[in-house]
Every structure is written in C-alpha cells, then in structure tokens.
Amino acid sequence: MAAIDYPAPIKALIANLKQLPGVGPKSAERIAVWLIQHGRELTGSLSSALSVAGETVGECEVCGFFSSAGVECQICESPGREEDSLCVIEHPTDVLLLERSGAFKGHYHVLRGKISPLDNVGPDDLRIAELLDRLKKGNFKEAILALSADVEGEATANYLADVLSDFDGVAVTRLAHGISVGGGLESADELTLLRALEGRIGMK
Amino acid sequence: MAAIDYPAPIKALIANLKQLPGVGPKSAERIAVWLIQHGRELTGSLSSALSVAGETVGECEVCGFFSSAGVECQICESPGREEDSLCVIEHPTDVLLLERSGAFKGHYHVLRGKISPLDNVGPDDLRIAELLDRLKKGNFKEAILALSADVEGEATANYLADVLSDFDGVAVTRLAHGISVGGGLESADELTLLRALEGRIGMK
C-alpha cells in the first residue's frame, strides 16, 4: 500500500514555499494548505502578482534602484530632486528607508553590496565604475556614503573615499554614527536615519 | 515631488504575500524583495506551482481529502485499505497526521470543521449527510470519531454518536484521551496519535 501524502501539485507548492526566507517546512505546509482551502481566486492572484513582478521589475541602469519595464526609475525621472548630491547605498531597499526619513532629496547610487573578502565580494563586483562615471558626467557637489556601520561597510567607505579623492569638486561624506554600530540600515528607525543624515562627517 | 515607493508590481506582490498565514507586512516585504533579487526563474517557478495547485487540486467527493484533477483521491482509489472502518476527521490535513502514525488502515471522512455555534457552524455546515450516506451504502463496522479534544470537538462527537445510534451494525468509537486536552490533532506527536487510536473507547 503506497504511503498517503499530499497530491503532487501541493507537494510542489510546499517545496517552492520552503525556499522563501523565514519560511520553514511547517510554515510552508500551513501556507500551502491555507492557499488551497481558500480557493482558486487567491492562488491565481498571488500567482499572477509573482509572474508580473518577476517579468517586469528590473534594475535602473543609472542608479540601480528597482524599475518597472517601460517605466523609468521613479528617482531618475523625478524632476524635483536636488541634482548636486548623490547618496551611495548598498541595496535598492535602502532607498525607501532613506526616503521615509525625509532628510534627503538628492539622487541615489546603489552599489549592490559592500566589499567583503570573506564572501568573495571585491570592488569590481560592486557598481563602482558606474559611480565614477556618474560623478564625472554629472554636477554632483557631494557624495554621501550611506553604508552599513559594520566592518565591511567601513572598509567600503574608506575604499570609496580613497578612489573619490581625485574628484576635486565633490565632497565625500559619510553618515554620522547615529545608526547603530554593527547593524545594517534596516535596524535603524526613521528618526535615527534623519539624525545620521544631518550629522554627516567629512572624510577628505 | 511624489513619494518614492516600490514599483507597482512589487507593491502588488507584497499585498498578496501579506495575506498569507504567519506572514506580516515586514516578512512580506522581505520575501518580495528577496524573490525579485533572485530573478525570474524563482518567481516563475513559484507562480506556476501556485497556479497548477490552485487549478488542479480539489476535494474528493467521497471522503473530502485533497484530490488532483483527473486523478482519484489516493485513499478512495487505494485497493489495500480496510473497507470496514471509517475514521471521521475535521480537516483534510488530519489524514496525513493519522497516516504518519501508521495505526489506521481504513477509510476517512472529512467533516470540514466541527460544530461551533460561536463561529456560526452548525451540523448542516458539515459533511454529515455525506457521512450517513456512506455508512448506509458501505459495509462499515466501525466509525472512529477522531475529532479535537476541545469543547466543540466533544460536542460534535456527541452529536454524531446520537445521530449514528440508529446504525445497528456500526460501532461508534472516539479516540482515547491520549491526545492533549484542549488542543487539535496538530499538537499531538505521532506516538500520541498511535496510543489514542489504540485506546479508543465505545460511545454506544
């Protein structure tokens, strides 16, 4: 007698859900059964939201923030932003954290990570060439390094300060130590991010 | 200047994920960004698993367990199972919990809930008519009520024992109080379920 188990489509769904961050085997099973019991409308809606997001969301070639196919990145196309200050960040999600603090009105540049020899991430793996290109062509007067306050973030900031020392018209600053040391931008609340932006400190 | 936010497809995905059980707004955001950053292959795979599961998984008309379109329910089509005992359960997922205990080889009947006046669930909302029909037509010698050991489960068991008192050839039993009182079948481990099945007690 064959062992009784979920039908194959449910097992496939559980296997897919189990891969998501923060979703273990038990949660995946609970979510899958819940979805099935809530019917076709819900699975269809989530399924199409996933496929639309997967197919249309990309990365802005200029700043590295999320962009939707056919629509320019919201920040690069926005006419009201300050054209002379550039905020250098690790992840596209950091844009939203900084925007919510309300303290920055300029442009962003996503590095897509930080220098981390243990994870095999060197300067060439980050969007540093694109950063230099933007600073050469644009009219930026300040580059704010809004990186994590951990060892890799500090190393990346120091590396960038060194590389950017050739740009005479561009001041290089970093966030004040308002953000909690050892953590990423995610762990700071909006007020802390505001203080950190206001108290930024010159590096050259 | 418009507020900067995720592109619409990511927002739609977050809104969908937030509905899932155990997934809050923060987790939904983390999962959505993680999916987007892991690319089209992963979103496509989860999207199609969802749509296949949503479209093909249904409910077996006989026992109420999950069935896949075009494929009969695994339990009803299985030739090796005992034809004379029927285990009455609340949820289709209870089938797997009991199967894993290895103590039961008969057939199942899913009620799709329990009598619960506070939630507006009465006997007519459960698959009780289908149960009586199966007992009339089949050759069952025993109906095991494997319901939750909480107030609603006990009330449902008593109601069923009363209704089933007319079936002379069918013994009605309930699970022994090996399962932890106050909880559902989910909270019992496999051994506890095995003991509970072995120690079942006559009700009429």
Image: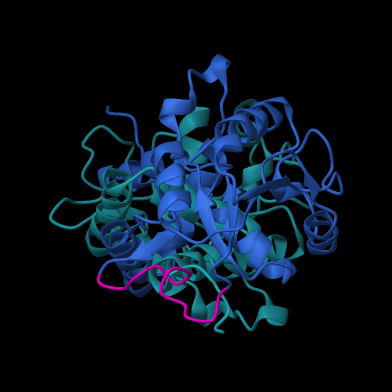
Chain colours: A blue, B cyan
Instruction: Identify the residue shown where x is 74% and y is 67%.
Output: A101
Instruction: Identify the residue shown where x is 55% and y is 36%.
Output: A166
- Relative to B90, A63 lies left or right: left
Instruction: Assess whether residue A72 is covered by the magenta stretch.
Output: yes
Q: What is the residue that sits farthest to the front in this orientation?
A: A168
Residue B150, image x, y percentages: 75, 58
Instruction: Identify the residue shown where x is 29% and y is 45%.
Output: A7
Q: Please identify the quarter of the rendering in which residue B191 is found.
A: top right
A77 w.r.t. B44: above or below: below
Residue B168 visible at all: no
Which range is magenta?
A70-81
Residue B143, image x, y percentages: 49, 51
Q: Please identify the quarter of the rendering in which residue B136 is found.
A: bottom left
Q: Please identify the quarter of the rendering in which residue A49 is found.
A: bottom left
A34 w.r.t. A179: above or below: below
Instruction: Please state, as top left, top right, bottom left or bottom right, where the N terminus of chain A lies in the image.
Output: top left
Q: What is the residue that sits farthest to the top in this orientation?
A: A118
Instruction: Please state, as top left, top right, bottom left or bottom right, where the C terminus of chain A lies in the image.
Output: top right
Q: Nearer the viewer, residue B23 or B35?
A: B35
Residue B109, image x, y percentages: 42, 56
Residue B142, image x, y percentages: 47, 47
Q: Main secondary structure of the magenta part?
A: loop
Q: Nearer the viewer, residue B176 or A15?
A: A15
Q: Nearer the viewer, residue B95 or A77?
A: A77
Q: Nearer the viewer, residue A61 or B160?
A: A61
Instruction: Assess whether residue A130 is covered by the magenta stretch.
Output: no
